[in-house]
Image (cartoon, grey):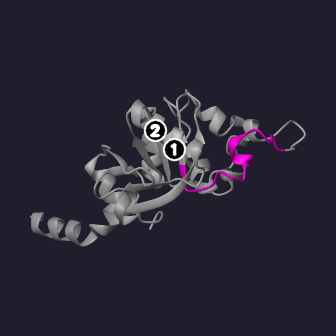
Amino acid sequence: MAYDKFTILKSTAVPLPIENVDTDQIIPARFLKATTREGFGDNLFRDWRYNNDNTTKQDFVLNNPIYTGKILVGGKNFGSGSSREHAAWAIYDYGFRCVVSSFFADIFKGNALNIGILPVTVTPEFLDKIFKAIEANPATELEINLPEQTITILATGDKESFVINGYKKHNMTHGFDDIDYLQAMNEEIKNFAAASAY
């Protein structure tokens, strides 16, 4: 499989209430030399996480040990800018399996879905509820239910539905990328080709 199957994820979340987070902030261009997906998590939000002398910036959320989890909650317009796939790779390699925002750049959203990160789009009002819940208690858990397409703040019971393309939903619940999807249909393709032969 290309990545882990995604069905129901219950996790604490890391809040990043910054709007217009672009792909160069997610993974700066100087770290795009590798061609495999591994290792990019070390440089996720590099310029926000580290000073020029490579010491950590203590006021950045990823350097704050009270915030942990497999869910990243971002501000509006997450993943804008260049189309680099490495931004999604960095988020996945760091350990996030879901990003929540009130709006995603289309190319980033597609890149995330292709490698097993679920981008969950919520209303601005629900996003604000999430940020407030995490601020009140960093141990707040969210439940992302992909089969039912819902996101729930478990402490309050607040719930909202989200939309996902049916093909991408199928692939994520099976852990498939596009190639895996075709390979899973190998017998059907062979049978169709045989039946269609003259």
Along the line of sight, the residue nearer the viewer: 160 or 89 = 160
Residue shown at 68%/52% (left/top)? Answer: 66
**On-image quarter of the C terminus:** bottom left
Residue stretch rendered in magenta on the structure: 56-71
Query: Within the image, what quadrant is residue 191 found in?
Result: bottom left
Secondary structure, mark 1, is helix
Q: Position of residue 176 (x, y in %)?
A: 39, 62
Residue identifier under label 1: 133
Residue identifier under label 2: 129
Along the line of sight, the residue nearer the viewer: 157 or 16 = 157
Left/right of residue 48 with respect to residue 168 in the rendered view: right
Q: Amino acid at mark 2?
A: Lys
Along the line of sight, the residue nearer the viewer: 197 or 118 = 118
Q: Amino acid at mark 1?
A: Ala
Secondary structure, mark 2, is helix
Left/right of residue 136 with respect to residue 160 in the rendered view: right
Q: Are marks 1 and 2 in contact (CB under 8 Å)?
A: yes
Prevailing SS of the magenta stretch = loop
Query: Within the image, what quadrant is residue 179 found in?
Result: bottom left
Mark sitting on residue 181 = none
**Badge 1, how many Cα within 10 Å: few under 14, some, many 20+?**
some
Residue shown at 51%/44% (left/top)? Answer: 133
Give the Cα separation between the discs numbered 1 and 2: 6 Å
Q: Is residue 66 magenta?
A: yes
Q: Looking at the image, which residue sits at the far right? A: 53
**Badge 2, how many Cα within 10 Å: few under 14, some, many 20+?**
some
Q: Position of residue 56 (x, y in %)?
A: 82, 44
Residue shown at 87%/36% (left/top)? Answer: 52
In the rendered image, the vertical position of residue 154 relative to residue 197, given as above or below: above
Q: Position of residue 41 (x, y in %)?
A: 67, 52
